[in-house]
Image (tube, rainbow, N blue to C red):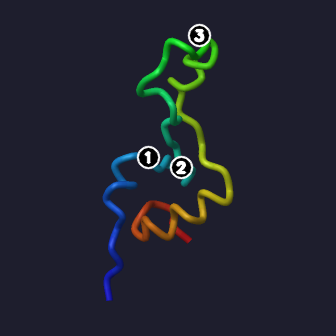
Amino acid sequence: MKLKTHKGLSKRIKITKSGKIKKRRAFRSHLLTKKSKKRKRKFAKTYTVNKVENQKIRKLLPYGKKNK
């Protein structure tokens, strides 16, 4: 039986060639006046997901590249 891909998640992340998962940081959408410039700069960058989150994401994206 085919497994279903979680479409909401697949639109929010990117799997690199080496198999790492890149994701945008949260808290960048609104209420930015109270946040420091340094903090807002960090929100702009993408980051690689940690080991625990990585395992959860792999279950939701069964056909992602380098899926073990």
State the residue position of label 3. Answer: 37
Query: CA separation, marks 1 and 2?
Result: 6 Å
Q: Nearer the viewer, mark 3 or mark 1?
A: 3
Q: Are the residues at dot 1 and dot 2 in contact (C-beta closer than 8 Å)?
A: yes
- First along the sequence among labels 3 and 2: 2
Outermost residue toward the bottom in this view: 1
Question: In terms of secondary structure, where does tag 3 sit?
Answer: helix
State the residue position of label 2. Answer: 21
Q: Which residue is at a point 51% across and 65% down the rendered structure image? A: 58
Quadrant that contains the N terminus = bottom left
Quadrant that contains the C terminus = bottom right
Query: CA separation, marks 3 and 2?
Result: 26 Å
Q: Which three-letter amino acid code belongs to the residue tagged 3? A: Lys
State the residue position of label 1. Answer: 14
The image position of residue 47, as x and y in percent, is 58, 37
Q: Is residue 48 left or right of residue 9?
A: right
